[in-house]
Amino acid sequence: MTAYIVRLEERITYKEIPGIVKRVFLPEHLDVLSRGRITVIRILPEIEKFLIRTRKECYTQFYQRSIQRWKYNLPPGPFCWPLIGSYEVIQAKFLHEIFVKYAKKYGPVFTVSLGPYQMVVLNDINSVTEALVKSKADFANRPSIHSVHMFTEESKDIAFANYTPTWKLHRKIAGKALRQYLAGNRLEDVLHASMKKCLPLMDKENGAFNPEKYIDLMVFNILTAVCFGESVELDDPEFIKFMKLSKEANEMVGKGFVEDMFPIMYKIWTTNKYRTVAKTMNELISIIKRKFEEHEETFNIVIRKHLRQTVFDIFSAGIDTSRVTLGFAVRYMAGLPEIQSKVQEEIDRVVGKDRLPTVKDRENLSYTEATLHEVMRLGTAVPVGLPHSTICDTRVGGYDVPKDTMVMINHWALHHDPRYWKEEEKFDPTRYLDENGKLGMKPESWLPFSAGRRVCLGETVAKPELHLIFATIMQRFKITLPEGTNPKVELGGSGGITIPAPYKIIVKERNII
Ligand code: HEM
């Protein structure tokens, strides 16, 4: 089975080969031959092998799935092609949306495939609690995905490594380090220093602007302080480069790589998308590596790669989620003047106008905290969380889930489940308050940080960090939308992280501090 592309022209060079062919094949995989006026681009034998193997893989997967369906009582789900999976899932801009559609048809626990990955998706709090909490560690592994393995230096990180004794120790040490960091006033000091630099710059903006770069800096400075005890300025070239690369990588990673559907491609050829992301990830890791080497003497406890990846985890998992949540917070407040005023009234009453909010104020700023909870619900930053994988044959929602099945948690579905949220699309901070206006029990179906063995490691940092930044911005500025802007918040981004669609705000100083 030899694949040929024939052109009725003179002999051509690699440069002249049509873009579509080059996007898929590297020069070394193409044999350009000339036969008089006919140029033949012959794909080399490795590719032929790949095509044959793909066909075999298709049959194997078809039989394996048939046997699984016969052996186990798997959750129902839509029709999925072998190797390709559900075409609708591949096409979907947001996975959480198509998952909600399937949940309506097949129930809160369903099976769907994306490429070769057959996954079980959990869409309500009962199934999520059963899997993540009641089933102990059954769902605590991570699926083995080749690209993730490469980008995490062979799974030396926390977020994507399997649930092993080494991982448990790694997570314990990192968790302890974060808790120790938070024990003093350091978070507050770093944040206040960073806010004092950012707020006057925001104030100087003329007219409508996008506050993204200021939010990025506030969040970045907290994490550089946690990891390296230092902070940077808005024009720091490394900060600018890191944020640019990180956003590019997020945007491109989207729903993953075709190479992960056909891992043999890694041996034969890789797509442009994969090569570009690999380059971006290498650049990101080298920034961390350089910073890490500068501070190496302070990090001599565990293996180097583990530490480097821990720092990378903190930056990648911590920055995007926090900056996106704060972006949503600012965008929601700009479109909801009444709620903004209530937040400001509370801050003025509890903190006053002569000092910046502190971590201690948080317990007395219930409405402000409830507003952030509502931002995290409606603008769920990580709508389908991180993929889990089963350690053993197990069960959820009355169905079997075989060992090594990928399991996704649809946090978005939990946060919009009409059985738990009255008028689920309405922004209403009072959902979280008791009759005395104090923060009550956490609503059952509110789970932005997930739960169980793989619960977000940074929850203890994220909560006070988001609170301090949000309260400080609200204390200082009245935020509005430029005239004519629709107050409704639209979703942007793709793949794993949702962001508010591009927006601009106008800030007006509230004449305090
Ligand atoms: C608004 C802020 C944040 C949100 C909404 C959030 C959400 C999440 C979610 C949904 C997961 C997946 C949990 C699972 O697998 O079930 C996760 C994992 C994780 N997060 Fe966060 N996160 C936030 C901030 C942070 C911060 C600030 C850090 C670091 C300081 C961080 C570090 C991590 C790590 C290391 C993991 C992997 C945990 C593991 O696999 O055991 N996150 N986060």
Image (cartoon, grey):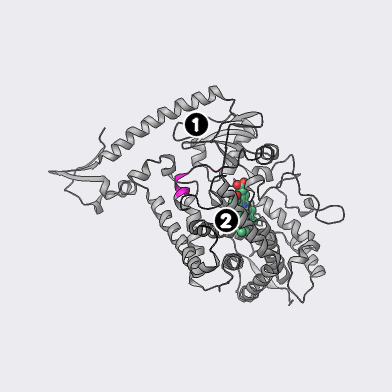
Which quadrant holds residue 217?
bottom right
The residue under label 1 is 80
- Residue visible at 44% across and 50% down in the picture: 150
Callout 1 crowding tier (Cα within 10 Å): few <14, some 14–19, many ≥20: some
Q: Secondary structure at mark 2?
A: helix
**254 displayed left or right of 506:** left
Callout 2 crowding tier (Cα within 10 Å): few <14, some 14–19, many ≥20: some
The residue under label 2 is 317
- First along the sequence among labels 1 and 2: 1
Question: Residue 432: percent from the left, percent from the top?
Answer: 78, 52
Q: Secondary structure at mark 1?
A: loop
- Residue visible at 81% across and 68% down in the picture: 350
Q: Quadrant of the N terminus?
A: top left
Mark 1 residue type: Cys
Q: Is residue 145 above or below residue 483?
A: above
Mark 2 residue type: Ala
User: Which is in the foreground here, disc 1 or disc 2?
Assistant: 2
Extreme residue toward the front, this view = 301
Question: Residue 511: percent from the left, percent from the top?
Answer: 73, 77
Question: Would you say residue 478 is visible in this rendering?
Answer: no
Which quadrant holds residue 318?
bottom right
